[in-house]
């Protein structure tokens, strides 16, 4: 299963292409109170920095699922608050978690992905891999380039 949160749509494109590559279903973490516009970004950045959660409408059903990819944009060096909600409230025993992050910082993207995977591992999941992708300057987003980049990086 490929689980994602995306505010401005970039992580969504990564998640969609990833789900085709690994042939797994997509699950959108829809927030109960969505972070909308610039105000949503300011609040979201502040919440992320303080490791706050944003409740989602539904958690994914892990029945029959052994491996997941969790996709999140980086906000203030952290996972988005909805992804923290997922991390804190889902049951991770026996589930392999792989993390995919998107962010604008070329130097820190992989480091952010690694630290988010550490946080999930601390919740008792099976540790998978962490992938950091840089999205800066790619607006409108180049789906084909993302697909090719991911095909080289992702090991199934
Ligand atoms: C509130 C907020 C905080 C962000 N903080 C960071 C950051 O600390 N480091 C970074 O490299 N990029 C940061 N970014 C950039 C996003 O991680 C990046 O643009 C991401 O690809 C957006 O994904 P989305 O389109 O799926 O929402 C931030 C963006 C937002 C909206």
Image (spheres, helix red, strand yellow):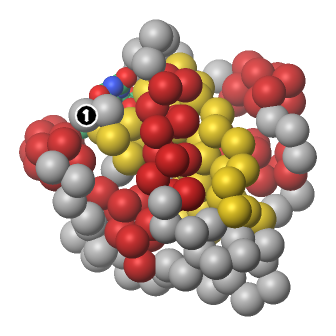
Label 1 CB, ligand 1: below 8 Å?
Answer: yes
Q: Position of residue 151 (x, y in %)?
A: 85, 30
Q: Please name the residue shown 22% across and 70% down the image.
A: 33
Question: Alpha-carbon neighbours of circle 1 within 10 Å: few (<14), some, or many (≥20)?
Answer: some
Q: In which image quadrant can residue 94 be found?
A: bottom right
Q: Is residue 22 visible?
A: yes
Residue 127 versus residue 76: which sits nearer the camera?
127
- Give the image quadrant in which the ligand numbered 1 is located: top left
Q: Position of residue 41 (x, y in %)?
A: 20, 42
Q: Is 32 rendered above or below residue 115?
A: below
Q: Please name the residue shown 86% across and 51% down the image.
A: 22
The local secondary structure at tag 1 comes to loop
**On the image, numbered disc 1 is attached to which residue?**
76
Residue 130 versus residue 83: which sits nearer the camera?
130
Q: In which image quadrant can residue 75 be found?
A: top left
Q: Please name the residue shown 75% across and 45% down the image.
A: 18
92 left or right of 104? Answer: right
Indicate the quadrant containing the N terminus: top left, top right, bottom left or bottom right. bottom right
Q: Is 70 rendered above or below residue 147?
A: below
Residue 117 versus residue 17: which sits nearer the camera?
117
Q: Position of residue 66 (x, y in %)?
A: 79, 72
Q: Is 29 rendered above or below residue 146?
A: below
Q: Is residue 11 visible?
A: no
């Amino acid at each position: 299963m490929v689980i994602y949160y995306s505010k401005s749509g970039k992580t969504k494109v990564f998640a969609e292409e990833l789900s085709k590559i690994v042939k797994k279903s997509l699950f959108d973490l829809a927030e109960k109170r969505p972070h909308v516009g610039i105000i949503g970004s300011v609040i979201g950045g502040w919440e992320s920095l303080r490791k706050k959660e944003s409740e989602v409408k539904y958690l994914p059903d892990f029945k029959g699922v052994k491996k997941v990819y969790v996709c999140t944009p980086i906000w203030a060096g952290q996972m988005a608050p909805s992804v923290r909600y997922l991390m804190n409230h889902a049951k991770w025993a026996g589930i392999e978690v792989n993390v995919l992050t998107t962010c604008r910082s070329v130097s820190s993207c992989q480091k952010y992905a690694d630290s988010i995977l550490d946080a999930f591992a601390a919740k008792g999941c099976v540790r998978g891999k962490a992938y950091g992708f840089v999205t800066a300057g790619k607006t409108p987003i180049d789906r084909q380039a993302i697909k090719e980049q991911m095909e080289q990086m992702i090991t199934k």
